[in-house]
Each structure stands twice: as structure tokens, then as C-alpha cells.
Image (spheres, rainbow, N blue to C red):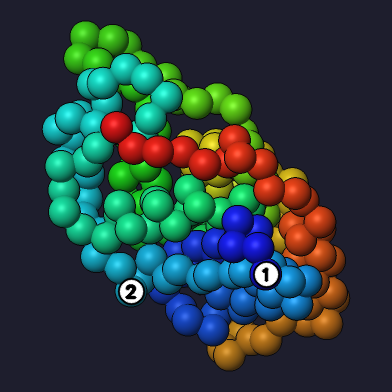
Amino acid sequence: MNSTRKVVGIVGSYRKNGITDSVVTEILSTVASQECKTEKIYLLDKNIAFCTNCRACLQVQGAKRGKCILEDDMEEILQKIESAYCIVLGAPVNFGNINALTRKFLERCVGYAYWPWGKGRPVIRNKKAAKKAILVSASAAPAWAGRTFSGGLGGLKKLAQILGAKPVGVLWVGLVNKKDMQLSDKTVQKARALGRKLATFRCSSATKRTIN
Ligand SMILES: Cc1cc2nc3c(=O)[nH]c(=O)nc-3n(C[C@H](O)[C@H](O)[C@H](O)COP(=O)(O)O)c2cc1C
């Protein structure tokens, strides 16, 4: 098995075995069955501090991710993502956007941008989206409404963009209103199809990034 053909799944949901997690699991299991290495990371299990807006990671120009001064699990998570050729990003919709844990993680990815003091806005260092991403979400609202009217899809796209990944598929589970709800057969089939799609992409050396 070629270790560079690795797919990393990020689960931002608070519920292990919830809908978001179950979809990510289904996608990763399919990828694994196609001779690709997979790893799932639960943000819930990780020590992720809030960004303090010190902006140290934003000051050095160049393509390499700026180094964060905080010592927690972010470096390990980002290195795993950087070693993958595809990623699966899963976050539920809470109060109209991706949930707080995923948002906290997104904010800590800011070192992929360059934003020296005095400049108006951050600029993503490496605009080439060399990885592929599948975006996964779940909402109480019907899928079409959640996708269209919440900020969830925009939040996941922003996360994919800053991680250098181009979204190639979205799986959104709507009407999550029952306790202990399971994935429908249709959702499982869609997840498996997306897993097979990810497994077909070839690894590019351009997917590898390093740190300042
Ligand atoms: C605090 C909170 C806020 C929520 N806000 C929304 C919302 O704004 N729109 C919506 O459609 N669903 C909302 N939901 C429902 C979740 O999106 C839904 O339960 C989803 O399946 C949770 O994902 P999980 O199964 O991965 O835990 C909310 C749930 C919680 C707990």
C-alpha cells in the first residue's frame, strides 16, 4: 500500500457515531477498501486552543504555513492533513453555520495565510488547491434548505480552501430530527460512491506542504 495515497477525515461533530461521523466513516471505509490508507481525526478528542489573534503565524512571507506559538494538538493534525492527498471534512450545522468546534479549528488554520500587521486582509499563501475534498454536513432542516440557506456549506468550503483542497463532492444529510437516527441506504450508497471517487485520484507531490 502506498502511504502517499492517504485520505484523512476530520470530524468536527460532538457526536461520535452521529450522522456526520457515520457519513465520514462510510466514505473512509470505502476508500480503505480501495487500497488507500485512511485516518479519521475527531476534533473532540484533540486539545485545540482558541486562536489568540497574536498573528505571529501570519508575519513571515512565503508559501510555507506560518508557525503557531500555541503548543497543542494543531501541529500534529495539520501535519497529518498535509500528508494526505484527499481530505473529508465533516461538520454539522448549529445555529446556521458549522459548529463551534469546527470553527475553532478553522480559525487555527490561519497560518496558511500571510497577513502582516498594517495590511487590510489575509492572503492565502498557496492558492493552488492540490488536494481534493469531500464536504459532509448534517442538519435538522431538509438537506436542500440546509445547503442553501445556512452558512454551513460556506464554512466547509472555507476550511477546504485554507487547507489547500478543492471540493469534489458534498454529502448533506437533512431532516436529522430523530434520536439515534441511522444513515438511510441511499445516503450509504452516496457515501460509498464518494469514497470510490476519492480513491481514483492520484497523489500529486504538490499536495505536500511544509512549515516555516
Ligand atoms: C446547538 C444546536 C444547534 C442546531 N442548529 C441547527 C440549525 O441552525 N439548523 C439546522 O438545520 N439544524 C440545527 N441543529 C441540528 C443539527 O444540525 C443536527 O442534529 C445534526 O445532525 C447534528 O450532527 P451530528 O449527527 O453529527 O451530531 C442544531 C443542533 C444543535 C445541538
**Based on the displayed image, in which of its 4 quarters is residue 166 positioned?**
top right
Front residue of 178/111: it is: 111
Select label 2 or label 1 by which is in front: 1
* Residue 97 visible in rendering: no
Q: CA distance from mark 2 to mark 1?
A: 28 Å
**Based on the displayed image, in which of its 4 quarters is residue 20 positioned?**
bottom right
Q: Position of residue 29 (x, y in %)?
A: 69, 77
Front residue of 89/126: it is: 126
Q: Residue furthest front?
A: 1
Q: Position of residue 22 (x, y in %)?
A: 62, 78
- State the residue position of label 1: 1
- State the residue position of label 2: 45
Instruction: Name the quadrant of the N terminus.
Output: bottom right
Marking on residue 175: none
Residue at 44 percent across and 57 percent down: it is: 80
Q: Residues within 10 Å of mark 2 (few under 14, many from 20)?
A: few
Q: Residues within 10 Å of mark 1 (few under 14, many from 20)?
A: few
**Based on the displayed image, in which of its 4 quarters is residue 196 positioned?**
bottom right
Q: Position of residue 110 (x, y in %)?
A: 34, 36
The vertical placement of 154 against 25, above or below, is: above
Front residue of 137/164: it is: 164
Residue type at tag 2 = Asp
Front residue of 175/156: it is: 156
